[in-house]
Amino acid sequence: MEQVVLKAERRNVLGKKVKQLRREGKLPAVLYGKHIDPIPLVLDFREASKALRGLSTSTLVILEVEGQRHTAVVRERQKDYIKNTLLHVDFQALSLTEKMRVEVPIELEGEAPAVKTYGGILVQTLESVEVESLPGDMPERLIVDLSNLQEIGDSITVADLVLPPHVRVLEDPDETIVVITAPRSEEEIEAASGMAEESEEPEVIAKGKAEEEEEEAE
């Protein structure tokens, strides 16, 4: 499993004063966990932003703080959505001997023959699943092979997931991940469009009638 190593320093600056750290190219963070007291941290902004970009919630992060290495995962990221930059990161420290539960993303791989052969529509209804394992066994993502979707109506459920050893999925085994649905015919599209137009018309009439009644009342 992929590991990201980041160097961090203990942070003495707290509260509103952390804005100055950001101006100096630093990224405020905090490390907390079951067996440690919360540790305010500061990281190099560029290094951390690059390392954490696209990281899943199950990817292990090694934080080096004053000569100690802490194994953690990213629990929360605060962002400036206008500038699309990180403002603060929460890391959860892990024990390598205790099982953890995290959401692992599902990655679709390959092509579904039913899409090409019958013009079927691939619908993904589940993008991640909660799993349990030791940190060292935790997968970064779970791959779903679409090549077995041969016919309209074929689906892949949680029970079909191929799991690494010592990893347990906590979701309902019958829950659907992806399914192939039939393409909508032109007649269905036109019918749906016609129904939408009809449903709008009474609203216009009702509005006009209400306005007339208001005018009469005046």
Image (tube, grey):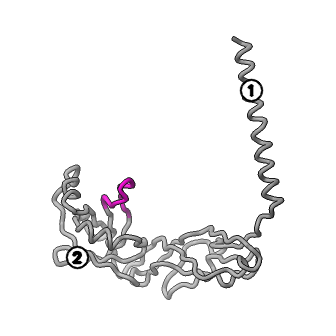
Instruction: Give the answer, above or below, for where 125 lies relative to 3.
Output: above
Residue under pointer 2: 64
Decide whether residue 48 is among the magenta residues.
no
What's the residue type where badge 2 is placed? Glu
Give the distance between the C-alpha atoms of the residues marked 2 and 1, in whole angstroms.
69 Å
Q: Quadrant of the N terminus?
A: bottom left
Could you say where residue 190 lies in the image, as x and y percent from the top left? 80, 55
Count residues near mark 2 (Cα–Cα under 10 Å), then give few for <14, some for 14-19, many for 20+: some
Could you say where residue 146 lies in the image, as x and y percent from the top left? 64, 81
Q: Give the range drawn in magenta.
A: 76-88
Q: In this view, does 70 lie to the left or right of 107?
A: left
Q: Give the residue at the far bottom of this rendering.
A: 165
Q: Is residue 212 left or right of residue 16?
A: right
Task: Assign the magenta stretch its main secondary structure.
Answer: strand
Residue under pointer 1: 208
Q: Quadrant of residue 46?
A: bottom left
Q: Quadrant of the C terminus?
A: top right
